[in-house]
Image (cartoon, rainbow, N blue to C red):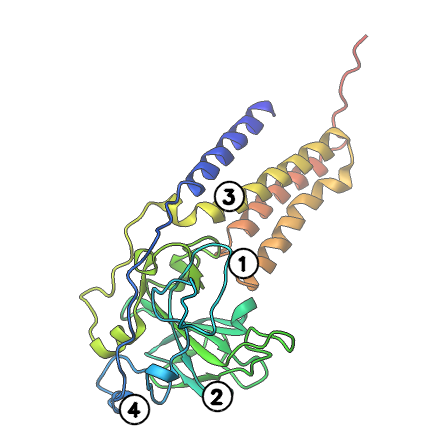
Amino acid sequence: MSSLRLWMSLSLLVLLLSACNTQFPETCPSRTPIGLANANEIASDDSLPFRFPLNESPIDENLYYGWFGVSNECTPDIVDCYEFPERKFHAAEDYKRPAGTPVYAMADGIISYSGRAGGYGWLILIDHPQANLYSLYGHLSPSRWKLKAGTEVERGDLIAYLGDSDENGGSKEQPLVTHLHFGIRAGQTADYPARGEWRYMGGWIKLCPQDVGWLQPSLVITGQEIPAGGYPQPNVGFLTRWGLELLFASLFTVGGVSMLINAYKKKTRFLLLLPGSIIIVAGIVFNHNGLMRGYMLPLIGILILIAGIYYYIRRPIPKLHDRS
């Protein structure tokens, strides 16, 4: 058992070192949104692959404070400003609209996520495999009609409505200006983890959005181009992208195995089935709530549960020989 613990400790150390090796930039290229005065004209042209998710898109005074790639640092001319304890960058474009404004799918695809997501209020993600993109629509209304995950949509389909200031990620005590947080990213939702700066629902992140696959939405909409093979994802190592999620799963694994070993040594047979069961349930709940991607944690739980069942059916559990 000592070699197993040593191997797990070394694995955790490698993951911790890889997770702590990220270099955060001082500044990132900030982009002013491209004017979409002809948004309605684009939306009515079915020959185009993309449309803007709102019926029209005036810029300037109607734009919220979240330009693509902009820093959260407050400048004197900005009244409303996010204040984080450290510098972060905006991975989307924010557009002010009244609560109840309809939001439409930017392209054909399938909804990969539709549910509550903390500061997003209600969040919808749509995979667009034909372009190797996914689109993100945040601060939607939980109380109004919206489409469910797994629904296939066509370009221009109504997917949800913007939420009121106390349900769109804000509250009655701290209302949030009603707006659409609109993001576009190269790849599909499942290509990204749920944790860290590479997370699939990132809004404000420490890395430059362009470096982790986020694209300037208004530029994609006006460009109306799909590269051969779709938009390319960033070419980075597996641990760079998935390191934090693997670390999270490893901590559960070490905890589950330790509980199993302890139950075996203490001959508490009913506890042999507990670690694996807890991890399976936790994995399902985390996946459902978007806190982890895939079914890695439930699979780990199943393996630990199988080990627990194996030792449980051994009758009796071997006793340690007394030393005389």
Residues at marks 3 and 1 touching, judged by CB atoms closer than 8 Å: no
Q: Earlier in the sequence, mark 3 or mark 2?
A: 2
Eye-nearest disc, 4 or 3? 4
Disc 3 from disc 2: Cα separation: 41 Å
State whether residue 185 is above or below residue 243: below
List the residue tagged with mark 1: 291
Q: How many residues crowd mark 1 within 10 Å: few (<14), some (14–19), many (20+)?
A: some
Q: How many residues crowd mark 2 within 10 Å: few (<14), some (14–19), many (20+)?
A: some
The spot of residue 250 in percent (x, y) is 54, 41
Give 107 or 312, whichever is nearer the viewer: 107
State whether residue 183 is above or below residue 199: below
> Which image quadrant: the N terminus?
top right
Question: Label for residue 40?
Answer: 4
Residues at marks 4 and 3 touching, judged by CB atoms closer than 8 Å: no
Q: Earlier in the sequence, mark 4 or mark 2?
A: 4
Disc 1 from disc 2: Cα separation: 30 Å
Eye-nearest disc, 3 or 2? 2
Three-letter residue code for mark 1: Leu
Q: Secondary structure at mark 2?
A: loop
Residue 162 visible (yes or no): yes
Q: Residue furthest right?
A: 324
Three-letter residue code for mark 4: Asn
Residues at marks 1 and 2 touching, judged by CB atoms closer than 8 Å: no
Eye-nearest disc, 4 or 1? 4
The spot of residue 217 in percent (x, y) is 31, 73
Three-letter residue code for mark 3: Leu
Q: Secondary structure at mark 1?
A: loop
Disc 3 from disc 1: Cα separation: 13 Å
Question: Label for residue 247?
Answer: 3
